[in-house]
Image: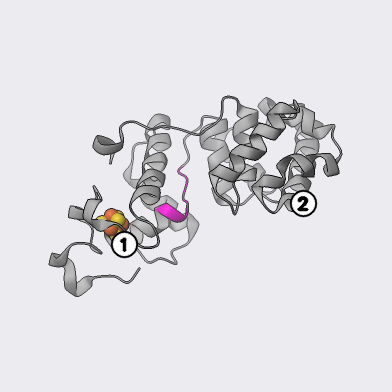
Amino acid sequence: MRSVFGFLNWWPGDTEDEIFIGAILTQQTTWLNVEKAISNLKGSRALSIRALSRMETSDIEKLVRPSGYYRQKAGRLSSLSSKIISDYGSLSGLLGLDTKILRKTLLDMRGIGPETADSIVLYAAGKPTFVIDAYTRRIMHRVFGIPADISYDSLKAVFESALPQKLELYKDFHAQFVELGKRYCKTKPACGECPAAKLCRYANPKFAPARLKA
Ligand code: SF4
């Protein structure tokens, strides 16, 4: 994938605050919608945990409306930012925790599930933890036959036991899966042009007896 897509290593966001807020806003929506909400927050000087902690939830709602589920997300951003400021003094204070403690702390916060927690740990805190998303799950199912309903932690363990625990590698690996999923391994896969086709059980006729259903 890297030979086709190049080194990606992304999360769209310039600061840890922007990455944290983006990770909440991207729940259950596309990044295109998140971009509009981020732009609104930026334009109102509200793209920081400290600024959000001082705002009324109703004002946050107006700004994050394009991201969908805006009432729920505004409520989450409001309560999370207040908690972070009161318990840790700043977002940096929270992100400075040891990797495992940080992940557990995030998972204990309302509105943060494993994918969001790992995205924040990896991209905002810059600490190696592998992120599993729907694209990763779908691709691993189609390419290697890993059960589609495997638990989040079990699939995460597949990667973490096989890869060296390197921050840049983890960042790039997740980005490569997202790129493959967006461009080729969609609900209706474009196997003919996909760079993973030779290795893929779903696409390769040589694996026909074990061919998996998407
Ligand atoms: S070959 Fe097809 S099924 Fe396999 S990863 Fe690519 S797009 Fe998905």
Q: Residue at x 55, y 37 (%)?
A: 121
Percent coordinates x, y for residue 123 in the rendering: 52, 33
Q: Are marks 2 and 1 in contact (CB under 8 Å)?
A: no
Q: Around disc 2, counting alpha carbons within 10 Å, would you say few (fewer than 14), some (14 to 19), or many (20 or more)?
A: some
Vertical position of residue 39 compared to residue 191: above or below: above
Dot 2: what SS? helix
Asked whether, in this view, residue 83 is left or right of residue 15, the answer is right
* Residue 110 is at least partly visible in this image: no
Residue 214, image quadrant: bottom left
Image quadrant containing the N terminus: top left
Question: Mark 2 belongs to which amino acid?
Answer: Arg
**Mark 1 C-beta closer than 8 Å to ligand 1:** yes
Task: Identify residue for label 1.
Answer: 142
Q: In the image, which residues are magenta?
A: 130-135
- Let me know if residue 176 appears in the view: yes
Residue 30 is a magenta residue: no
| Vertical arrangement, residue 207 with respect to residue 53, above or below | below
Position of 153 relative to 164 (above/below)? below
Q: Label 2: which residue?
A: 71
Counting residues from the N terminus, which is met first, the one under dot 2 or under dot 1?
Answer: 2
Residue drawn at the location 78% of the way across and 33% of the way down: 52
